[in-house]
Amino acid sequence: MLTDNRVKTAKPQEKLYKLADEHGLHLSVYPNGLRLWQMRYRFEGKENTASLGKYPEVSLAEARDKRDQMRRLIANDIDPVQSQKAAKEFKKIAQAHSFEAVARTWFEGWRAARSGCWRSVWTDLGAHRRAAWRRSPMTSNAHKSADRPPPAFQEYASDWFASRIFRECDLAER
């Protein structure tokens, strides 16, 4: 079993070496000085290795917590590496369908058909107002997360944005 002191004092050697902890967790020390937490596990009869992060960004205690989480997934017949990949893909899709992404797509199409009045509208909307919407997925469950605005706010933002654009640009085109 590793100690925090042993991990801190691990020095690179000519070849890669591993410092074993328990339940498949080990610290791989590379010749270039990189220290990487990894976990070996078996899933459906095949041996796999999962990376848990770099030391010192991930401490020994955090690596053990991640290992325990992965072991719980394995106990429930879930491959932890595939689970992580699926979570990243979901996050990528959610970002692509955020309020800002949808608004920008619509705005770019609308702007191509209008005069230069779009600049004042987008500038007026401002980064401080867009920041609240930037990572807000346009899903029915968006209101359940504390860091996302509720659907009512999204509807208000959409209405404000559209009314401001039409008001400004109708005046500019007259």
Image (cartoon, helix red, strand yellow):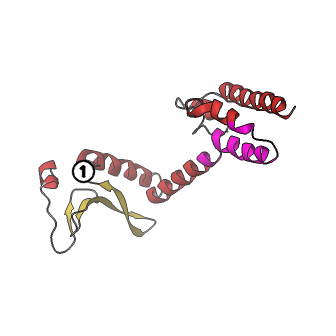
Q: Which residues are magenta?
A: 94-119
Q: Quadrant of the N terminus?
A: bottom left
Q: Quadrant of the C terminus?
A: top right
Whole-percent x, y for residue 112 in the image: 78, 48
Is residue 139 rendered magenta in the image?
Answer: no
Picture quarter containing residue 42? bottom left
Is residue 97 rendered magenta in the image?
Answer: yes
Whole-percent x, y for residue 147 in the image: 52, 31
Give whichever of 152, 129 is nearer the camera.
129
The amino acid type of the residue labelled 1 equals Pro
Q: Residue at x 62, y 40 (%)?
A: 137
Q: Residue at x 12, y 56 (%)?
A: 9
Whole-percent x, y for residue 107 in the image: 73, 42
> Is residue 64 shown left or right of residue 1?
right
Count of marks placed on residues: 1
Circle 1 is placed at which residue position? 56
| Main secondary structure along the magenta-highlighted residues | helix
Give the residue furthest to the bottom: 14
